[in-house]
């Protein structure tokens, strides 16, 4: 089995829902327990086995570039891709990176934190050509903002539908995807008026029965998209993310 060591992180949005907390700071750089969200994502993914990152930026892209220029990440490589159409849906941001990724890769959101062990388990799955495997959580009762969460409907291990507005669903989308590069073709075909979301591409894969699920079990994750979600995540971080490199650095020093 080929080892997956590449990761695409979508970090282009303007984070309007968190503006009262972030001001003009791009959401990936908003600090959570003393470290930018993006650093949480990078270190957790690296701990899971990722060695090459492709990061799509957009809103205040230069601020993110400047942050990277001040860091000393020696253990992994980072390529920054700019999406000037960052005001469009997140599928457009994913497509901005398609020339950088020709092998299976981990796809992450810049505002979803997770445990390294969960990402490591997902990376150990075998993703077939043109498939995507989405980490899903059946523990819907522990999610902070269930209304805003992206839901998935399942038929066995296959995902038959995905979206925030599903009235009937079985589990939640954790924002962690193990992808074959064929995802980009589905996103291109899903475009309407030059726009598409990740969910649009995932629904196309679901129609082809190529969107699979991976149950994360007792793994923890959080979508940190609002000031309230930030406050909640900080309150449970030491309990649910005890192995985080950020926690070791900033809380137990």
Image (cartoon, rainbow, N blue to C red):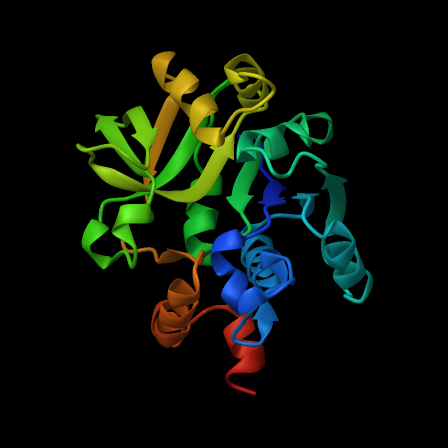
Where is residue 8? Give x, y as percent. 61, 40
Relative to 177, say whether 18 is above or below.
below
Rendered residue at 55%/51% (across/down): 110
Q: Residue 195 appears at what percent x and percent y?
A: 56, 24
Judge from the rendering whether residue 61 lies leftward or rightward of residue 217; answer left or right.
right
Q: Is residue 34 left or right of residue 207?
A: right
Q: Nearer the viewer, residue 10 or 164?
A: 164
* Residue at the bottom extreme of this rendering: 253
Residue 170's spot in the image, x, y percent?
A: 20, 36
Query: Can residue 212 be spotted in the picture?
Result: yes
Disc tally is 0
Q: Quadrant of the C terminus?
A: bottom right
Can you tell which quarter of the image residue 39 is in? Answer: bottom right
Residue 200, by quadrant, is top left
Whether residue 74 is visible to the viewer of this picture, yes or no, is no
Q: Find residue 103 and report its horizontal and vertical position in percent.
A: 63, 27
Residue at horizontal 51 percent and vertical 66 percent from the top: 20
Against 106, is 41 above or below? Answer: below
Q: Quadrant of residue 230?
A: bottom left
- In the image, 180 versus 25, the foreground residue is 25
Left or right placement of residue 3 versus residue 241 in this view: right
């Amino acid at each position: 089995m080929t080892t997956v060591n590449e990761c695409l992180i979508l970090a282009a949005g303007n984070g309007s829902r968190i503006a009262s907390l972030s001001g003009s700071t791009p959401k990936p750089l908003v600090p959570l327990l003393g470290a930018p969200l993006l650093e949480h994502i990078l270190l957790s993914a690296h701990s899971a086995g990722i060695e090459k990152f492709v990061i799509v930026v957009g809103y205040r892209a230069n601020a993110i570039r400047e942050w990277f220029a001040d860091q000393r990440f020696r253990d992994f490589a980072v390529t920054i891709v700019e999406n000037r159409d960052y005001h469009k849906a997140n599928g457009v941001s994913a497509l901005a990176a398609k020339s950088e990724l020709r092998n299976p890769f981990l796809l992450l959101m810049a505002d979803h934190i997770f445990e390294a062990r969960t990402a490591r388990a997902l990376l150990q799955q075998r993703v077939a050509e043109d498939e995507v495997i989405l980490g899903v959580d059946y523990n819907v009762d522990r999610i902070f903002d269930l209304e805003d969460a992206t839901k998935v409907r399942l038929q066995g291990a296959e995902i038959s539908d995905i979206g925030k507005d599903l009235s009937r669903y079985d589990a939640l989308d954790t924002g962690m995807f193990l992808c074959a590069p064929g995802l980009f073709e589905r996103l291109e075909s899903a475009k309407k008026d030059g726009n598409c979301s990740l969910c649009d591409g995932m629904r196309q894969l679901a129609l082809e029965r190529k969107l699979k699920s991976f149950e994360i079990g007792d793994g923890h994750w959080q979508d940190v998209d609002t000031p309230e979600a930030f406050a909640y995540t900080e309150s449970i971080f030491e309990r649910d993310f005890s192995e985080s490199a950020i926690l070791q650095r900033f809380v137990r020093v």
